[in-house]
Amino acid sequence: PTVECLESLQQIQDEQNLRVKYIVLPTLGIEHKVFFGQFCANFPQAKYFYTPGQYSFPLNFADLKFLGLFKAQALNDQAEQIPGIKMKTLGPIKPPGNGGFAETAFFHEKTKTLFVVDTVVKVPRSAPQIIDTKSLLFHAR
């Protein structure tokens, strides 16, 4: 996390009289995983969770304890690990070799807010037309 990010979080905590309670790694993506440990180090009082199916490369340390995150726990859809939050994990989907996809989505019941990271990229108001009529008629000749 950047200095600006941490300063912004501190400002929110101070203004709202709140503290970071939970830090979650909700996906397998390396671009998210690389900052997880750094965030945890900045908030030692928080509880740490990760989406099941984690891997590392070139050595596969699926358990984050091998990466120094001894307090981290795997998320479990069946347990209420974070009060007021329901969760559901998609995956892990693992092709042969390294990598894979998994993401845990979170639903805050009180505010009816859905939290996702990579699952939803863009949701248009109406479904896009897959093949426009002109092209379909042209190819039907």
Image (cartoon, grey):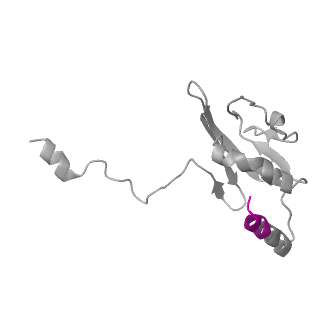
At which x and y percent is residue 68?
Answer: 85, 40
Quarter occupied by residue 56: top right
Residue farthest top in this picture: 96
Seen as rendered, the residue at the extreme left is 141
Residue 71: quadrant of the picture: top right
Residue at x 85%, y 52% (from the top left corner): 41
Q: Is residue 127 magenta?
A: no
Whether residue 7 is in magenta: the answer is yes
Residue extending farthest to the front is 58
- Along the line of sight, the residue nearer the viewer: 2 or 111: 2
- Which residue is rendered at x = 91% and y = 54% of the image? 45
Instruction: Work out whether 113 lies above or below 139.
Output: below
Q: Position of residue 18 (x, y in %)?
A: 85, 66
Image position of 47 (left or right of 86): right
Residue 97 at least partly seen? yes
Q: Is residue 101 above or below residue 106?
A: above
Question: Which residue lies at the image location 74% right of the left edge and 31% below the top edge?
Answer: 62
Question: Going by the image, does 70 lie left or right of 27?
Answer: right
Residue at far bottom of view: 15
The percent position of residue 126, horizontal first and vertical second, equals: 39, 57
Q: Who is closer to the viewer here, 132 or 4?
A: 4
**Residue bounds of the magenta highlight:** 1-8
Q: Is residue 81 visible from the viewing direction of this image?
A: no
Q: Quadrant of the C terminus?
A: top left
Look at the magenta stretch and give its main secondary structure.
helix
Query: In which quadrant will I find the N terminus?
Result: bottom right
